[in-house]
Every structure is written in structure tokens, then in C-alpha cells.
Image: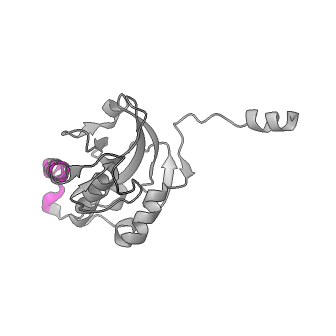
Amino acid sequence: MLALVYCVCSQPAYSGLEMQEVLPPLSFTLFCTQYPEDCQEQQDRRTMDFRSRRGRWRELNQINSSVNSVIAAESLSASRNDYEWQIFPSDGNCGDYAVTKRHLLLRSGWPSSSLLLSEVVLRTTGEHHLVLLVPEGGTLFVLDNLSGVIIQFNEALDKYVFLRAESGLNPQLWTRGIAKS
């Protein structure tokens, strides 16, 4: 018994600052089986004309707004299982919104390293939730179906506890800890 206490107590506490590889959500694994092209590394394919910060911001806002308005919100207790993330469903949950936004941005030429799915917990309800993180111009932005506007990561800390996110190095790896590049 003393050995067990020693093993548990001698492990450093997780501080949330360092990056640590973790298993992806089961939903993500199932999603990658159905949509393998969305789970592969994709390089930046945007044209040089589009490289203006204003143009990128405009596209982020347009995709965030359109996906939030096109998909009808479905409660977590709805008939379809929460773990079945789909691109372009007529109605869906947070996972459907996040992967649809990511899909559209990938198709617009954004690199997979800039489109990171992230599992969070809503501070108000304790519910698990999925958002899309977009590091852009030295700032980390959060795209969420529960908000009509894109917010910065620092503002999001009041709303969410960040559990894990896709790695910017490999879209099939997930990490605990957020790289705010």
C-alpha cells in the first residue's frame, strides 16, 4: 500500500502549461474513419493575394457565421449519438459545427496545422463541448457554435476549461495543453 501511495504521489501534478500527448476522443477516431481526407496533414494552399490579415479574418468570420446559421442546433439528448460527428448535417451538435468549419477552411486552403479541434468543458454547465482553435497572426482564436462571434483564447478561458486539442504538428495526434502560437 505504501508503494502505491509513493507511486501516485511522486508523479508531478499536471500544470496545464506543458504539451502532453493524449488519446484523441473516440468521436474523432470514428470521424477519421468516415472522412479520412479531413484527418490528413494539409499544407497552406492559400494564394498570395489572400495572405492579407484582413482577408483571412473575413473568411474566418464568414465560415463561422454561415455554419452557425445553416446547421440547426440539436440537443445532446437527440436520437443521433453525440459521438457521430458529420460534415454538413441539417441538424447537429457542437462536433458537427466544429468539423464542418474545419472542413470548409481546409477546402479554402488553410493548413491543417492552423485548424485545431479542441475538447472543452463549459464552465457554466460542466458539459463537454467541441470548438475549433485557429492560431492566426500570433493570436489564438476560438470558433464556437454557441457564440456568434469569434473570440480570442484569453477571453475563452472564462467560458471553458480546455481538456485536449489536436496537435498542430500532426492532425491525428492530440495533446493536453494548448500551443498558443
In magenta stretch: residue 57: yes
Q: How many marks?
A: 0
In magenta stretch: residue 74: no
Residue 145: image quadrant is top left
Coordinates of residue 127 in the picture (x, y in percent): 41, 38
Left or right: where 73 falls relative to 176? left
Residue 4: image quadrant is top right
Residue with the most extreme right position: 2
The correct choice, above or below, for 88 with respect to 164 in the image is below
The correct choice, above or below, for 113 with respect to 130 in the image is below
Coordinates of residue 23 in the picture (x, y in percent): 54, 55
Front-lying residue, 148 or 169: 148
Start and end of the magenta stretch?
A: 49-69
Residue with the most extreme front position: 79
Coordinates of residue 9 in the picture (x, y in percent): 75, 32
Coordinates of residue 56 in the picture (x, y in percent): 18, 52
